[in-house]
Amino acid sequence: MLGMVGRAAEGFYQVCRGLWTVFKHSGRPPTTKEFPDVMPELPGAFRGRLALAVNPETGEHLCISCRQCERVCPDKCIDITAHKSPQTGKLELIDFKIDHGLCMFCGLCTEVCPTSCIINTSDFEMSEYSRGALIYDLKRLTLSQEESAYYFAKKDLPPPKPKAKPAPKPEAAGDAGESLAQQPSDVSQQPGPKAEE
Amino acid sequence: MVPEMTEELRANKLKTDEMLINMGPQHPATHGVLRLILKLDGELVKHCEPVVGHLHRAQEWQGQNRTWFQYQALIDRVDYLSGMFTSWALARAAEKIDDVKVPLRAEYMRVIVAEMNRLTSHLLWLGTFGIDLGAMMGLPFYPFREREELLDLLEAIAGQRMMFNYIRIGGVQNEAPPGWFARLFKFTGSFPDRIDEYEAILSNNPIFLKRTKAVGILPRKLAIDYGVTGPTLRASGVALDLRKVKPYSVYDRLDFAVPVCNRDGDTYDRYMCRIIEMHESNKIIRQCIEQIPGGTADVLREKRKACSACGKANCPHCGGDLAIMVKKQNAGLRVKAGEGFAAVESPRGVLGCYIISTGSDTAYRIKWRNPSFSNLAVLPELLLDHQIADIMAIFGSIDVILPDVDR
């Protein structure tokens, strides 16, 4: 009989102890965040929607159509259309499609990109009404100059070399040694408007 | 003419039929899609047959069709609550074949993130275990509060909350961002108090004790026979923890205890085992932060300014033990021809990976030994002659993740 009373008292004490622990939390501010009103602060490494960066200073497109990302993508969701430019004999980007409906956001494409062109942004709100709308083309993928600067700073990426694009050019047109001084400026103008169209 | 009521007739008349009940596959408490075919005699379970395979995604087959680089990104999805461990098992198996020596700093980073992952897994288990027992409203959110803090840290270092793709063949993916170690150290300081908080709510609660004590007793021999591993096995009195028994990585340099119950474990023992493991994991993380060669990432970053992060192997701030990756991570990632097996101690038990490589960019054969599968196999024995209400208490206590069972 006494044992039963003792057990009951012990049980009552333990329940009260648990409830007191819970009660202690009643005064403090909530730890949860109301998402649409409070946006989460995402770290630089966050792997969100894919995008193509431009050079933050000059605004020229960083993609050199090397197709490394297309090759490494586990879901085969990247589709690059490029052709050899008849004037310069160099690869030229025509279209760049990413099907975000297939993408698993593994970030492998961003790791292999030699020019840090394709990056994972911090954007994760990308619901659409149709699957077709999840296929992003070059225009929707390309970031503005300010956005590129923001992500380059946030992700701590090495800044693109000032003439990242024309650099391999002299080798391709190796014979034309004397016109080297003119060529880079010539080339850097060409992909610029192409990328932004 | 009424027949005489003999003993035999009476027994036939009063006999209740066994009832066949199908529990799942879409059951909120089965942590995924598990189907249990139950034969019930009244409230008592007389026979149970788990039906697995609803979540089969051919993870092994995909490993043979994807390149090594691509497969590393996929295997976090095998056991989504402890992705670091699947990555680690694959990385260790491949490194064994490759004869790659992982730098010491990378090994410490692996232990830190893996133990953090163990904490998040146990914390989620604790919350859902409360739900399984009927503590619907309050309890789950206490562990989830700490879990969010840890997941934020893992997100900052790996890029995503649960699909990390952080531990790679040959090291780890990247260095911690600024302030990461300080945040983690602060967390480990306050975490033991938080565990005490859960314990104050749960451990001695009379309702909780009634639901868990002497429920689902798993005898030592039965556990060994079924190949049960992890906290479930240790709660039954077998001291099998790969971190102690066969120390891999840098676990032999760390001071931690493995909780082992010295009797046939019941549901409460399995609960207690995991609670103590959380304390130990916390200790391991603290020690690793103190011992890690090169100091925290911020200290190292300052030092590397002197050499402008040259990345040379003989540099005192970049190479040797202080590098974090020794294999180039790109589409051309190859593993030498050969075969190798490696196992790690995941939150659920021994997680093994067996690889046969022919030296090409894909594996010839990949085989996973997943702890959840063996742990689930013992469930029918545990459920025998238990009330139907205890099914979820017992099932919750062996901590099975269904994608890990079906792969």
Image (spheres, coloured by chain):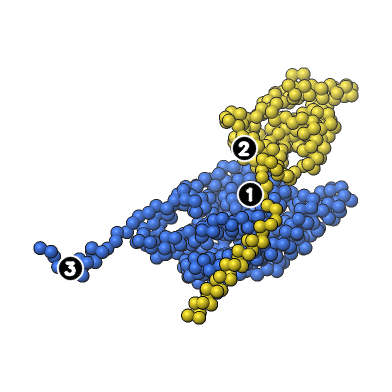
Shown in yellow, the chain is A
Shown in blue, the chain is B
Residue B5 bears which disc, if any?
A: 3
Looking at the rendered structure, the kind of residue marked 3 is Met
The residue under the point 52% across, 75% down is A7
Question: x%, y% of residue B77?
Answer: 59, 48
Residue A136 bears which disc, if any?
A: none
Q: Secondary structure at mark 3?
A: loop
Question: x%, y% of residue B199?
Answer: 61, 66
Of badges 3 and 2, the one in the foreground is 3
Tell me how far mark 3 sits from mark 2, CA to CA.
73 Å
Question: x%, y% of residue A171?
Answer: 81, 28
Q: Is residue A93 above or below residue B393?
A: above
Whether residue B49 is visible to the viewer of this picture, yes or no, is yes
Looking at the rendered structure, the kind of residue marked 2 is Cys
Q: Relative to A73, is B238 on the left or the right? A: left
Residue B162 bears which disc, if any?
A: 1
* Chain containing mark 1: B
Total tally of numbered discs in the picture: 3
Q: Secondary structure at mark 1?
A: loop
First in sequence: mark 1 vs mark 3:
3
- Whether residues under marks 3 and 2 lie with C-beta atoms below 8 angstroms apart, the answer is no
Can you identify the residue that label 2 sits on?
A: A103
* Chain containing mark 3: B
Looking at the rendered structure, the kind of residue marked 1 is Met
| Residue lying farthest to the top in this orientation | A87
Question: x%, y% of residue A142?
Answer: 72, 29
* Chain containing mark 2: A
Tell me how far mark 1 sits from mark 3, CA to CA.
66 Å
